[in-house]
Each structure stands twice: as structure tokens, then as C-alpha cells.
Amino acid sequence: MTVVPELEFKTMLSGLNFKMPRRFLINSPEDYSGSFPAVLKVSSEAITHKTEVGAVMGDIKTMGNFKETFKEMKRKFPGETIYAEEMAKKGVEVIIGLVKDQQFGKLLMFGIGGFYSELIRDVTFKRIPIDRFDSEDLLEELKFGRVFEGYRGLKVNREILVDLLLKISDFAVKKEFSQIDFNPVFLYEDGYLIIDAKMVI
Amino acid sequence: MSLTNLFSVSSICLVGASREEGKVGNVILKNLKKNYKGEIILVHPSAEQIEGVKCYRSIESIPHSIDLGIISLPSKKAVEALTSLAEKGCKICIPVAGGFGEQGDEGKQLESEMKRIASKFGTRIIGPNCVGVIIPRTGLNTALTTEERSNFPSDGPIGFISQSGALGLLAMDEFSDSGIGFSSFISLGNEVDVDETDMLSAMGDDDRTKSIALYLEKISEIEKFLSESRNISQKKGIVVLKGGQTESGSRATSLHTGSLLKTSFSLNGIFRQSGIIQANNEIEMIDFASVLSTAKPVRGKRIAVVSSAGGVGVISTDALENEGFKVNRTSNELAGIIKTKISQLGSPFNPIDMTAEATNIQYENVINELDKSGEFDAILAFVLFQTFGVTEDIIEFLSRFNKEAKASLVVGVIGGEYSRMAIRKMNENGIAAFPSVRRAVSSLGALYERWEFLRRFEK
């Protein structure tokens, strides 16, 4: 089982036109030309749960702040690749996953993301490939699927979400993997952004 | 001869018939004698006849071919009988007794021997360690219960496959006085040969079976089961009650997806891809199978509620909205029409309340108008017999409406003995009728899920 470095995986996804925040490889702080706030991340093969070890540092508001954080990260993770992203504005959070199961074959998982997701575990599974109807069903099958009708001023474009799920299924058909997380994915009124993506082969 | 022939075999051979009252081989014989319409052939080493049926000394000495063999003998002897039957060209065998794989290594060896016979001779084996089969249309019944204690199912549209023989019999007994009939009941037992998918296919091909209910604890070949279900569910509804945990085969948990697969895996979404509707308990399983066999799929979320009791309308509305349906208000135009058809004290807005002054003709008029308006996808009618204006004659209208209308119809009848008798008559007339708000509403849910699947194939 090998972890694909996150930056490499994200680059692959960009090539396939998946939408993610603007991303910059950072060798020195000057390489960042995006907006603030920004996020700095370590792209490593070894670390998959990064927030716990400080390999993701978010909410960086100024260049000064950026430089300091970068220096600190370099010290903590010597030799590792570091990249930065523009911090995305909050959307409705979902988790989309792919897993190769011995019994069922390739499965797509769709669920509610965010702070309470680990508690409510509102997820549903489909065998890949899915069709448009399956994709629509995924939204219906969640207990908290009502968030897609709009929640706390956050609106979701169902059509775009259905298309994204289909695009991910299509991607899964062609790819070999053991597990993939798109977690979280932010949904907006006019689009979506994959905030984090991890792949294990 | 395929498994489908099981539904129509005209002669059967019972090996292990017994003269002794209460013995399995005696109970089965008596049940067969009483109900089976075909020819019964018995095999017994010493008896000339049992219960008036001639016995052959051995399987070999039977002068003609055998379609179906029922073996009521303990483990080793059962395998011997199976071998003789297979050599004689018998195509389906049902060893009912236990004492095989469920009892250790020796039993497992006997099961391997059975498998070998099945593949060598092409004989299909149902069981062992099973209740066997009940086919009401031919009277074939290998169950070990007597008619004094348990009602045998009557003929009807539901095909029922169970990995627990006892649960299957209990469920059918429970429903026997609701007027719900079965095209067939199959208890799979240890599944040395015939498994749930084989039986599902056979029921898929059987014209008398309009919907299929399965109680499953394990699914041996999931891939095969799902794809066969998807084929069959384009023609008939499939309901599964899944007992026990179903675990995915994955062990990896390094990412979130993997760990959620471990902790929160559910078959629901995967079943829906194959048109399988999941039931939560044995009552829902038969309710859903029943409603799928008689009522039209519900093609949208707009439900009209009609009743003669305001409270029933109100709690039905709550239950429907909880289920995700809309009890949308009738248009002013439609309300105006309905107002002229019901008591002045009633309410023409959805939920429509006709009050205790309701009569058969009011029900008929209102239900027809609701359908004609095109404002609703389904009508949930509570036909309550506690008031004088409503009589059993209404069944004739409901039955006709069910066949001809655009909207789907589900009926609720709440009450005691009299109402239960009415439910029975309705079900016998192909009207989906339920004894509670909860069950009627859940069944509408199943009809909606059915349409959600079928719309894939509409042009």
C-alpha cells in the first residue's frame, strides 16, 4: 500500500479538470502569488492524517505570517515538499470517497462532511460505475440530505454536485486504487472545490 | 428441466415416508395427500402402503421417471437416496433433514458428496436442512407443520425465498388471514447447490410470481445476485429483508473512506442500484412485496389523503411528510368540485375529510375526481367501516379504480374483526390494503422507490 504524495495527486486531478483552490509549489515564500488567507501544506508519502501533526497550517493572513509559518514547517519537516493554497470560502461540506472492496468491487462513498461528520456518520455507498439516477439517489439517501436544499445561507447547486459524482465515478472506472478521499469537498451555489484529496494505491 | 419446473411438477417421489404419527415422514405425507394435486410415489423398505398410498421397495424399482424427489431421511441415508434418485434422472431433489454442514466435519463431507452428485447428474438440490417448498397452486408442501397449528398460504402473486425456514413459515402464517397469497415459498437451508440467486432467477421466469420477497442472512455471490436482481426488477419488484451484519471485504482503513466503510457500511444504496427495496422487518417484507404485486408504482411525491375521520387524515399527513411525501393542497378548482360531493361539514382540501357522513358513493366520486385532476401521484384512502354509510360494496369500485386509474391507490382500514375481514377481501381482489397508518405510508414509500428505479428505463 503506497500513499501518493498529495501534490502529485492534486496535479493529476487538475489535469482532469477537477476544481481545487489555486495551488503553488513553495521553495521559498516568494513563490506564493495567491491571495490571503492562505494555507501551507506538506505533501508527503508518509503522512496521511496531517492536521494532527501540524503538517497543515491554515488561516495565514499576511506575507509576514506566511514567511514565519513556512520557516517553522521547513524545520519540522525537513526535506519534504511544501505547497500552498488559497484558503477557500466555506461551503456545504461533503466527503466523497472511493474504495476497492474485495466483495463489492469499486465503491463510491458519499456523505455529510464537517465538524459532526465523524459523529453522525451519514454516508451511503454505490457500486461503480454509477449513472445519473444513481447519482441523484446518493443525495436522497443521506439522512441529512436536506442540506442540499440550502442551509444557513449556504446554497448548493444540485446539478453540479450530481455531475461531480458522475465525474468521480468515471475517474474511478479508469484508475487503479485502494482508497481515495475527497475530504472535504465544499459545495457552493455556483460550483464546488475539492479542498483535500488523498490517494492510496 | 430447469428449476422453474418446480412450480408445476405433476408427480413427486417421497423417500422416507413414515407410518408413525408425528414423524416428519408422516406429517409431510399427510400434508401432500390432503393438498397435492399431482401423483404421489412412496418409497419404503417394508411397508406395502402408507396412508393408502402404494410403496415401492426401492427407488430403482419405480417403473417410470421421477420429476421431483423429497427425501425425508437422516444424513447418510439421505445422500444414498439422493444418489439413486439422481441416477434415475430425477432433476430436482429436496433433502429436508438436518445433520449436515451445520453439525461439523462429517456433515460437511456429506455436503461435498451432495455437491458432487449435483454436478455429475445435473440434479438440482434444494437444502438440506430446510423446510423445503410450498407451491400453493399445485398443493406441493414439504413443510413440517400441520394445518391445525399454522395456516398454509393460499395461492397468490408473491414469491418468497427464505434462508430461515421457520421465519418464512411464521411470516406467512401471520399474513394468511389478510388474504395475501403466495406463488411459492422456498426455504433454502444449507444451500449445497441451489442458492438465493438461482431461486430468484426461477421466480423471475415464473409468470404467476408478480413480486419477490427474500429473507437473507448471507449472499454467497454478491456480484451475481445484484446483476440478476437488476434484470428481474425491471419486470417485478424485489424486496429484501437482510438479517445480520453485512461486512464489506475491505480491511484497509488508512483513509476516511476505508474507516467509514468499516463502521458505517450499508447495503441500501447498492441494493437500490439493482432495484432491490429493503425492508426493516418481516412485516414490511411481506407488506412491500404485496403492495408491489398489486398497486402501481408511485410516480411522484404528491399524495392525496381521503378519509372519514379527521384525525386519521392528520396523522397520515404527518407520517407521509416524514416519509418525504407532500400532502399538497387541492387546487381551488378541484376543492370546489369536491365540496359538492361531500358533507357540508367536511373539508375538500387535502387531507380530505368526508366526516362520519361519508358513503360509498362519496368515496367513489372524490377518488375519481382526485385522479381526474392530475394533481396527485397517489391516493391514500382510509376506508373506515365503523360508520353506516360505508359498506363492503365499495370493494368493487376500488378494484376497478386500481386497474383503470392513473394515480396509484393504497387503502387503509383500521379496526377489529369486521375491518380485518374487509382487508382480507380487498387483498383477495388485488387492492393493497393495510391495517394501520404506519404500514400504509411505508408501503407507499416502497411504491415510490419502485418508480425511482423504473424511471431509468422509461423513454
Image (tube, coloured by chain):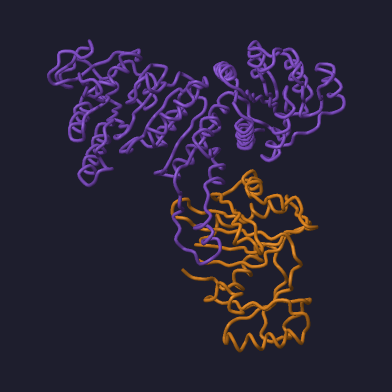
The chain in purple = B
Point 78% across, 57% down: residue: A152
Q: Is residue B75 left or right of residue B318?
A: left
Which residue is pictured at 47% across the width and 37% down the height? Answer: B228
Q: Quadrant of residue A25?
A: bottom right
Quarter location, residue B138: top left
Q: Residue at x 22, y 18 (%)?
A: B42
Task: Tell me: A134 left or right of A104.
Answer: right
Residue A71 higher or lower than B138, as above or below: below
Percent coordinates x, y for residue B231 in the rendering: 51, 35
Q: Position of residue B398 (x, y in %)?
A: 66, 16
Residue B147 in the image, given as x and y percentages of width and height = 37, 19
Toward the viewer: B271 or B186?
B186
Give how far across and how far down residue A61 sits, in percent.
77, 80
Q: Which of the 4 image quadrants contains residue A86? A: bottom right
Image label count: 0
The colour chain A appears in is orange
Residue drawn at point x = 52 percent, y = 33 percent? B283
The vertical placement of A200 against A55, above or below, is: above
Q: Which of B384/B297 is in front?
A: B384
- In this orientation, which residue lies closer to the viewer: B276 or B88? B276
Q: Nearer the viewer, residue B197 or B327?
A: B327
| Residue B100 in the figure: left or right of residue B201 | left
